[in-house]
Amino acid sequence: MKKRGNKKAEGMSFEVLISIIIGIAILIGVFYFLFGNYIWDYVRNLPGNKYDNRDPPIKNISKDDIILTNYYKVGVILDGKYIKFCTKGDCSSLRDSKLYLNEDDRSGTIYTDINWAFDKKIGVILNSRIIIDRDIFAGQGIYDKVKNELPDYIDLRNLDNSIYISGTLYRDKEYVVGEGERVFGTRFNYMASDDSSFGEKLKVLEEGDVMIVYLSYVFGDFKFTEVQLERVGDLFRVFATYTDSSGNSQTKLMDCNKNRWSWQTKYLSLNNVKESLTATLDGNCKI
């Protein structure tokens, strides 16, 4: 009986050990899923693993290197991780971004820096070439979750398809936004000044598109410098840009329902659009 009891105890101990091992494996898996990116970042930044001296940004390119001197410099990757943008090809004037590279410069992932475990993947780097998710440029997919952490459209377009060489990101030439191109899925239309063609131009605006009108318009204590109208069905969201009492530029959504044609919205109705923006603001809108 004693021997049988020992065997039973040994069997139970083995089952308990297996259960503990499985539990630990699950905890490690969950922990790595949540914090894997940061663990590898920490390891890379340990003494002896830093990227600082391995890929310093190129400041002076040899005159003999004809290829690189003719290429457009998009940005740099500092410390093997942080993406900063050059200003019109000038890397002596760098601008911060919320983008960073995880893993390495030949096969890695581009993330937006949102909040540690909630950082979002927006692209990859393959064979030292950066590729940004196509849906982002179309204003679709993950775009709504990362739009506040993205750089300007033109910076992101230049980053896309750039090549990483010794700390610097290059393109064969600068990307230029084309006529009628949609910016993150939105087409922008511009009027240099308010005139009688405003009403007709606004009515042919497509769903989700935006018209920006530059004008000088005094509204109570506010002086507008431009107005942006975004089409949503047969309604328009109206944003006014003005200079506040401190001399700072501010943008605010206007209430263009002052005549209470509908209790459901403050948007401007297509039926209430006049031939000029000034007349439309006078008849419909308030701050």
Image (cartoon, rainbow, N blue to C red):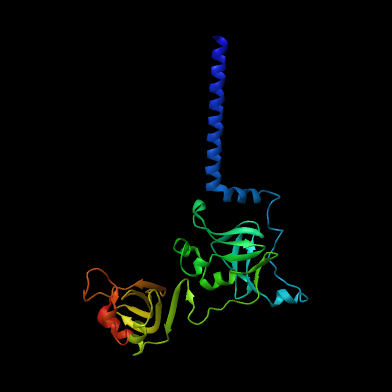
The x, y position of residue 14, in whole percent, is 57, 25
* Residue nearest the observer in this picture, 123 or 192: 123
* Residue nearest the observer in this picture, 236 or 285: 236
Say if 195 sits above or below 18 in the image: below
Q: Quadrant of the N terminus?
A: top right
Is residue 45 in view?
Answer: no
Say if 101 sits above or below 172 in the image: above
Say if 20 sits above or below 225 in the image: above
Say if 150 sits above or below 180 in the image: above
232 left or right of 179 in image? left
Residue drawn at (34%, 86%) of the image: 200
- Judged from this view, the residue extending furthest toward the top is 1
* Residue nearest the observer in this picture, 145 or 92: 145
The x, y position of residue 153, in whole percent, is 51, 71
Instruction: Count every numbered label the image shows and give the total.
Output: 0
Residue drawn at (59%, 47%) of the image: 39
* Residue nearest the observer in this picture, 280 or 20: 20
Is residue 36 in view?
Answer: yes
The x, y position of residue 192, in whole percent, is 42, 86
Residue drawn at (47%, 61%) of the image: 142
The x, y position of residue 164, in whole percent, is 66, 66
111 left or right of 186 in image? right
Quarter location, residue 108: bottom right
- Judged from this view, the residue extending furthest toward the bottom is 196
Q: Quadrant of the C terminus?
A: bottom left
